[in-house]
Amino acid sequence: MDLLDFAITPLRDLLPPLAYEEARRRARRASYSDGQIVHARGDDAARLCIVAQGAVRFGRFQPGGTLNLVRMIGPGAHFGDVAVQRSTQTHDAYAVGPTQIDIVDAASLKVLLDHEPGFAAGLWQANTARLNALLELYDDARTLSVTARLAKVIYLHCGRGALADGVACLQRDLAALLGVSQVSIGNALKELQAARLVEPGYRCVTVPDKARLKAWLRKTSAA
């Protein structure tokens, strides 16, 4: 499956080389197998985690035992620092495939923020981008149809993973990501397919013409 991270530049790519190396020096690297829990919702471990290899899937378990996907991030992306302020983790996190994570504890994170301006600036940029994506997602939920929201998510992630012309994902993950039912996602995909904007496939959605999809999004005020 491809990452579902709303095309946000990972923290590692925003850090000056020396700042990243200092963060690596202060970090403890941990390894996880596929499906292994990284942290559970409610854990109080305050730390900054940077994915070195693999991916991490975030969600919340529903009463029936289903994990509703919130996002999935890959190499260079960070997480966990919210617990430094909230004193608790807000979501369950699991490794996707063999995964390695660099863990910076709260004390080391404070040193980096106090003495490495490049690190502080990079973390600010990364978190600001996430906040902007969250606000846009919230605004889209209030103003756009499910079809337009789905088209936007597909456009943002198209070509960023295993498929050069699409997104490798499950319909249930798209439904969880947008907070709608799988039936709604199925109907939205049918609409987009009828407009020749996407082609649903097995565990994937392909985009025949990304420029055409972008033009459609602009026309619907989604871009």
Image (tube, rainbow, N blue to C red):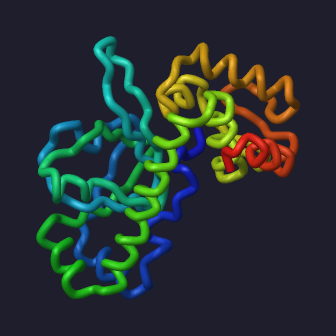
The residue drawn where x is 51% and y is 32% is 178
Front-lying residue, 42 or 195: 195
The residue drawn where x is 21% and y is 45% is 89
Quadrant assignment, res 200: top right
Please indicate, yes or no, whether residue 162 appears anywhere in the rendered image.
Answer: no
Front-lying residue, 210 or 201: 210
In the displayed structure, would residue 145 be above or below residue 137?
above
The residue drawn where x is 25% and y is 58% is 81
The residue drawn where x is 17% and y is 64% is 105
Image coordinates of residue 211 in percent, x first then y, are: 84, 51
In the displayed structure, would residue 217 be above or below residue 189?
below
Query: Would you say 152 lies left or right of 177 here?
Result: right
Query: Would you say 80 lies left or right of 186 here?
Result: left
Image coordinates of residue 72 in percent, x first then y, are: 47, 44
Front-lying residue, 220 or 68: 220
- Quadrant where the image shows the N terminus: top right
In the displayed structure, would residue 49 be above or below residue 188?
below
Image coordinates of residue 4 in percent, x first then y, are: 54, 44
Please indicate, yes or no, whether residue 22 appears anywhere in the rendered image.
Answer: yes
Count of numbered circles on the image: 0
